[in-house]
Amino acid sequence: MERPVWFKWWGREPIDPPDTATIIRENELKEARLYMTNTLVDALYNVFPGMIGFPRRTLIVEGNK
């Protein structure tokens, strides 16, 4: 599962922090690995917002049910 997350202050603080416990519960995962990455789509979205301090990253959730 992938979910975009927007940040403020040049990536220091998420605007709407993802609730990882809810994500794990909704996907009924017994084990989970979550990580943030910058994808090509994030790079395209970041052309203007990234310059003014609001970058986007992608949260990736992997796990076993």
Image (spheres, helix red, strand yellow):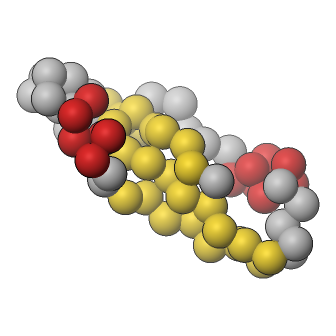
Q: Residue furthest left?
A: 51
Is residue 33 shown left or right of residue 8? right
x 57%, y 50%: residue: 2
Q: Is residue 23 visible?
A: yes
Estimate the x, y position of residue 22 in percent, counting from the top left: 79, 47
In front: 25, or 15? Answer: 25
- Image mark count: 0
50 shown above or below 20 = above
x 58%, y 65%: residue: 34
Q: Quadrant location of residue 43?
A: top left
Estimate the x, y position of residue 49 in percent, counting from the top left: 21, 23
Is residue 29 shown left or right of residue 38? right
Estimate the x, y position of residue 29 in percent, counting from the top left: 84, 67
41 shown above or below 37 = above
Quadrant of image for the C terminus:
bottom right
Q: Is residue 11 visible?
A: no
x 37%, y 58%: residue: 37
38 shown above or below 29 = above
x 53%, y 30%: residue: 16
Estimate the x, y position of residue 6 in percent, counting from the top left: 40, 33
In front: 12, or 40? Answer: 40
